[in-house]
């Protein structure tokens, strides 16, 4: 896809801080992080929005989401439990879709936010 920022990042034509790469996905640090940990998970293939996905995309979407626990563990934001079973840490996982959803880059991406609060621009 010409002139797609995240296609260019996936093709390494534009540099990024890559934290994970496999045959289908690239994960890199958001250039303007809204939280101490802010990662973007993208498919290497161009898909504009979640609205453009069909059931055929289920394996790709599943692969993106099922990578989150490993990314969270690697970045020290996985949920942990104390002896009383109280949870701590954790993260937010978000997809913006279309103008009303606040999407700015039209190449499907999943945001992973974590780390000590407060986070910029987020109340919950
Ligand atoms: P959206 O609003 O589309 O869901 O999120 C787009 C995200 O991409 C934003 O959080 C923004 O900071 C990030 N971003 C935009 N341009 C670049 C870039 O060139 N490199 C990186 N690493 N992140 C970018
Ligand atoms: Zn693209």
Image (cartoon, helix red, strand yellow):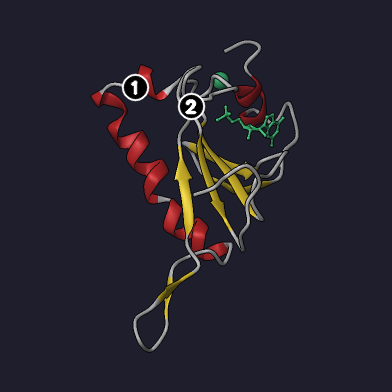
Residue occupying the far bottom of the picture:
83
Q: Is residue 90 left or right of residue 27?
A: left
Which residue is at 72% across, 39% downward? 32
**Disc marking residue 38:** none
Ligand 2 falls in which quarter? top right
Q: Quadrant of residue 17?
A: top right
- Placement of 42 over or under 113, stated as above or below: above
User: Does the closest atom of ligand 2 sit within 8 Å of the Cβ of label 1?
Assistant: no
Q: Quadrant of residue 12?
A: top right
Element class at badge 1: loop
How far apart are labels 1 and 2 at the CA level? 9 Å
Is 121 in front, or is 96?
A: 121
- Placement of 19 over or under 90, stated as above or below: above
**Disc marking residue 108:** 2
Which residue is at 49% across, 56% downward? 91
Sequence-wise first label, 1 or 2: 1
The answer to whether the residues at label 1 and label 2 have Cβ atoms under 8 Å apart is: yes
In the rendered picture of this protein, how many numbered marks are placed on residues? 2
| Residue indicated by mark 1 | 53
Residue occupying the far front of the picture:
123
């Amino acid at each position: 896809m010409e002139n797609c920022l995240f296609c260019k990042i996936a093709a390494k034509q534009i540099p990024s801080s890559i934290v994970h790469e496999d045959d289908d996905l690239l994960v890199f640090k958001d250039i303007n992080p809204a939280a101490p940990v802010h990662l973007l998970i993208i498919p290497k293939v161009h898909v504009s929005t979640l609205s453009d996905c069909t059931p055929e995309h289920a394996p790709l979407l599943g692969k993106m989401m099922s990578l989150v626990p490993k990314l969270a563990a690697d970045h020290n934001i996985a949920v942990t439990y104390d002896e009383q079973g109280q949870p701590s840490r954790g993260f937010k996982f978000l997809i913006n879709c279309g103008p009303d959803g606040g999407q700015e880059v039209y190449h499907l991406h999943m945001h992973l936010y974590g780390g000590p609060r407060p986070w910029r621009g987020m109340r919950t």
